[in-house]
Image: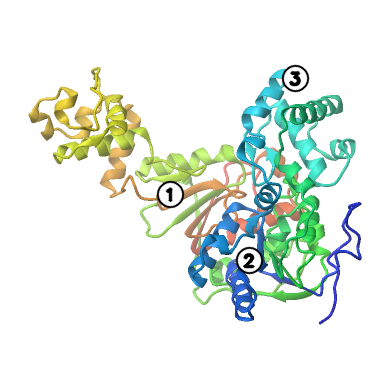
Amino acid sequence: MTSHWIYQVRSKKISRKEIKVRHVQIILGPPGTGKTTSLLKIVENSLARGIQPERIAYLAFTRKAANEAQERAMEQFNFETSRFPYFRTLHSLAYKRLGLKREDVMTDKHFVKIGKAMGVEFKGIYDEDLGIHSGYGLGDKCSRVESLARVGLRDLETQYNYSNENDLSFHAVKQYHDSLSKYKRDNRLFDFTDMLEKFEEPLPIDICIIDEAQDLSSLQFRMAILASQNASEVYIAGDDDQAIFGWAGADVKKFLSLRGDKVILPQSFRVPRAVHRYASDIVSRIKNRYVKPWTPKLEHGRVHYVSDDDNIDFSRSGTWLCMARSKYLLYRLKKVARQQGYGYIYSGRSSLDTDETRAIMAWETMRKKKQISLFDAENLAKFFLFKVKLRAKETYSLEDFGLPPEAIERDWMSVLRGIPPDEREYLRACMRNGERFHDKPRITISTIHQSKGGEADNVVVLTDMGKLSWDALGTDEENRVWYVALTRTRENLFFIRPRGLRHFTL
């Protein structure tokens, strides 16, 4: 078997000679070509050769990918979770190997404390998968520059000069870096980047699978290679055409420079022919890439041009994925879903999973002469127009709310008057459409970046763009973003006519 080196790691502790492995295979998986299935086939073949599951690592960029691989492996091979200890994200692996506990790790509240001490504000959230802050507060910006310097293996000033945080001074970034370092040292805390930096021991494994490799930063590549150092076989899977996290430190150049036997998964089981034509046009605009011919599925599918948001008909059967390039544009899609009376998922939460819907379900439960819990009773009481004083007990009925027996005849609309009128109308419309509050909605509304790894029968794309993405129009990464958007489609792709001059041209 031919020997290969993956790439030169910039580390004092790892030399080119030390990272030599016997076999490296690079698996290139275009959209919907069954990459996870192919990787689990490698696991299956390894098990068939007598390799123990504890000697197989499956390392992924996101928790979603790692969890999916672990769940499918447990189901397919009938093993307990403990038999696959190395099916993890890189952060999770480092966390486990370093013996950390949750209280050892920085959270948003710690960053807020640092910000208050410095007089800077954090307006975004700390993304644990990416290891950086979103948002546009001064604290968020300082944190991004500091984090990107570390994951990119750059010094702080180089990263500052490279960044596009134009209203940020290097003095502020340096002050933040010093304050963060002191705070972590004084409180014995780790941030997510620390975990990657302090990972030093190769895993006791024979097989190492590295998934979503196009999204790894230089630091993550270094850790992944160190982790795989003892493996006789390394499989690196990804698709450079779907590398859309460069802004978060991902280094697609590392992926493109990998050396090893390359395998292309040629058949998509997701993307229909009509969508494939558009996707092929967009991907042809990407200059630096592996050329990966792939075939769409047999079904033709349809591409629709819609003149306005209101013309999207969510009554069409199947699942929906509605995307925009920038988060601020998503209000348009949420507005349409609400007007038509359909539930949706936004930022990971269902629009039908609210205190209001729980109150409605509690009321309907009592109307069936069944009792409800203290939690549901206290929540229900918030939406009566009169004050209710509940006695402490395990379960509650109509009588406990001081309501007469005939109240059982009244529906929630006439009782729960504390629900705001617009929300009442929305929920009533959802119920008329047969939406069930406890079910997962068919509609997901997200940015294109948040949709990564997702798919749906019906995909809606807003082609309007914000200034930052507009300024990047024509770059490889921007073309990759739109390629990812289109290739989430299983059946129908809808383009909504842009409202402004800043928009992506198909």
Q: Is residue 506 visible?
A: no
The answer to whether 16 is drawn above or below residue 385 in the figure is below
Q: Are marks 3 and 1 in contact (CB under 8 Å)?
A: no
Image quadrant occupied by the N terminus: bottom right
Residue 457 point in image, percent of width and height: 46, 61
For label 1, the residue is 311
Q: What colouring method underlies this structural image?
A: rainbow
For label 2, the residue is 54
The answer to whether 415 is drawn above or below residue 286 in the figure is above
Q: Residues within 10 Å of mark 3 (few under 14, many from 20)?
A: some
* In the foreground, 174 or 298: 174
Q: Which label's residue is closer to the chain start, 3 or 1?
A: 3
Query: On residue 118, which mark appears?
Result: 3
How many numbered tags mark residues here? 3
Q: Amino acid at mark 2?
A: Glu
* In the foreground, 492 or 108: 108
Q: Amino acid at mark 1?
A: Asn
Q: Residues within 10 Å of mark 2 (few under 14, many from 20)?
A: some
Which numbered mark, 3 or 1, is in the foreground of this view? 3
The answer to whether 90 is drawn above or below residue 193 in the figure is below
Task: State the SS at label 3.
Answer: helix
